[in-house]
Amino acid sequence: MGTILTSEAQCRDCYKCIRYCPVKAIGLKEGQAWVVEEKCIWCGQCIVVCPQRAKSTISEGPLVEKFLAEGARVVVSLAPSYLATAFTSTPWKLVAALKTMGVFRVEETILGAKLVAAEYGRLLREQKQPTVITSCCPVVVNIIEKYYPALLSALPGIVSPMEAHARLIKAQWGPETKVVFVGPCIAKKDERTVDSAVDAVLTFDELVGLLVTQKIDLEHLADQKPDATVAEIRTFPLKQGTLKAAGIEDTLAADVISVCGVEECMETFTALSEGQIQPRFIEALACRGGCINGPAMDSNLTLPVRKARLLKLAPTATAEEGDMAVAPSVKLQRQHGASGYVELEPSAEEIQKVLALTGKFTPADETNCGGCGYGSCREKAKAVCLGLAEPEMCIPYMKNKAQSLSNAVVEITDNGIIIVDQDLIIQEYNPAADQMFNLEKRNAKGRRLDELMSAANFRRAWKTQKPRTYRKKYKDLNLITDQTLYPIAKYGVVIGIFTDVTAEEKRRAEIYNMRQEALSRASRVIKEQMRIAQEIAGLLGESTSETKATLLELIQIMQEQEGNEHDPQN
């Protein structure tokens, strides 16, 4: 698992981490950023600048708690830049809190810095190599190992103050002692290799988070000084701090230079590689102003305020047990080697194909706006070829694409669209509106709408700032429209959308007339049928009466005949 993690849920396509990454070690796919570890120098800038706090490191706080729970002897190596923090009212409350947690000793990393600085002084006096570059800063070491392997010989092969102090602690208190480094640097987590004497690394803010989980109320603790320090080189975490600690002349001479900030360091290394400069000694720090501006420092103080705070507190921060008089002998050597990372170079044809995907066919099309986070369109195209970026990251292209799409929709829609400002001056209209109202022939753009048609509803919509929907007939144009008016105060306009319903109204009228005609015809037919039915009923009534009389007469005759046939007298 990497040193720097990205939360997919919080990463939101802003490209800010890419923009601020000095070596462009951020990849992006489907809108999600990730750290390309083989390119990363672990400067931590992506964590600092992320507006969504989507990037973080894995805290080793639980590991420290485990050490303490198991009863291990834990010694904390506290980076001297703690004096410049403002997590608590005084920095020594951090020391008191560590003791409250059960830490055996709290010593300042500056004890290791003293040993390292002495080695630099010796190297400079006995200098055999043309240039020595300090290796105190792990980010600087990463830059050289990954991007300037030709300068590896300039690294002195000396461990950082953190590692030197950890080895010193183990030499004093036994190899089973657990050494926990606490400081402002994220790269220290990556520096702690398998064979390191450091057992855990916490940043300042991770330490404060751990104290919160431990429910330790820092402000109610009495101040407590570190158990061991070296007071005279308390300015070590500042720019030129290494020079002072090593007793190297602090001058403007070209043979001794001090640089800080990744960009300035890389500019210096480039110049050195190209033979443009030939200094004897280079103090290089990745953070602007020194370690007091590390990525894990609290953000409530500016760099000048932190520097002033450290300089003010340094003379008063004497150790409880005094400075260490005799230090055990420890090895300060380390090996440096090239990382093996090689940046691939896509072909010109591959880059041109990617550029074409975002509408860049000629150099004039390359805006180099930096919106994607890269310094130029070609740099981004190269990243796309390497699978580290996406064509859609080009903001001008996506903006133009969105505008072109919306313009295409407006152009081809059957609905008429007229846009007027708050003074009813026509700003835009589309072809459908022109066809409905003959706007082009009437030179409509720039004219008041009420000079061409009724604008009362537009005026009312702007005044009320509420959408209006209604149907309106234009007899002179033989036109009927459904209209919806949208006032947009932000842009000072009213957008009118017109739907031609003339044909629909005509069909509706035709259907109405057909219905009326059908009803009229049905009414006439019913009346005629009623008349005929009445006539038939009359005729049937007379016929029925005659038939009835005839039948009655016939029955009477038949009854009389039957009676005569049965009479005995006959």
Image (tube, rainbow, N blue to C red):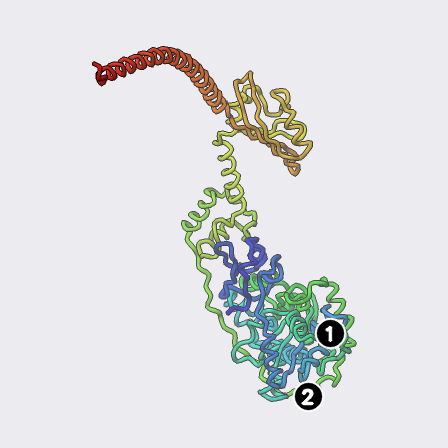
Residue at image location 46% in from the left, 68% down from the top:
340
> Is 109 left or right of 378, judged from the image as shown?
right
User: Could one spot residue 267 in this view of the protein?
Assistant: no
Question: On the rendered structure, is 124 left or right of 503?
Answer: right
From this view, report whether residue 68 is shown above or below residue 40.
below
Mark 1 is surrounded, within 10 Å at the Cα level, by few (under 14), some (14 to 19) or many (20 or more) other residues, namely many
User: Which numbered mark, 1 or 2, is in the foreground of this view?
Assistant: 1
- In the image, residue 296 lies at what x, y percent? 64, 67
First reached walking from the N terminus: tag 1 or tag 2: 1
Q: Amino acid at mark 2?
A: Val
Give amino acid for label 1: Leu
**Outermost residue, front side:** 569
Residue 519: x, y in percent?
A: 45, 18
For disc 2, the marked residue is: 326
Q: Nearer the viewer, residue 405 or 332?
A: 405
Q: Name the image quarter holding residue 274.
A: bottom right
Element at badge 2? loop
Q: Quadrant of the C terminus?
A: top left
Q: Nearer the viewer, residue 543 or 484?
A: 543
From the viewer's perspective, tell me whether residue 420 is left or right of residue 2: right
| Residue 7 visible in the current orientation | yes
Look at 51% across and 33% down and name the residue there: 410
- Which residue is labeled 1 in the image? 218
49 w.r.t. 235: above or below: above
Quadrant of res 303: bottom right
Left/right placement of residue 560 relative to residue 169 reads left
Q: Secondary structure at mark 1?
A: helix
Picture coordinates of residue 338 (x, y %)? 49, 70
The one nearer the camera, 14 or 359, is: 14
**Circle number at residue 504:** none
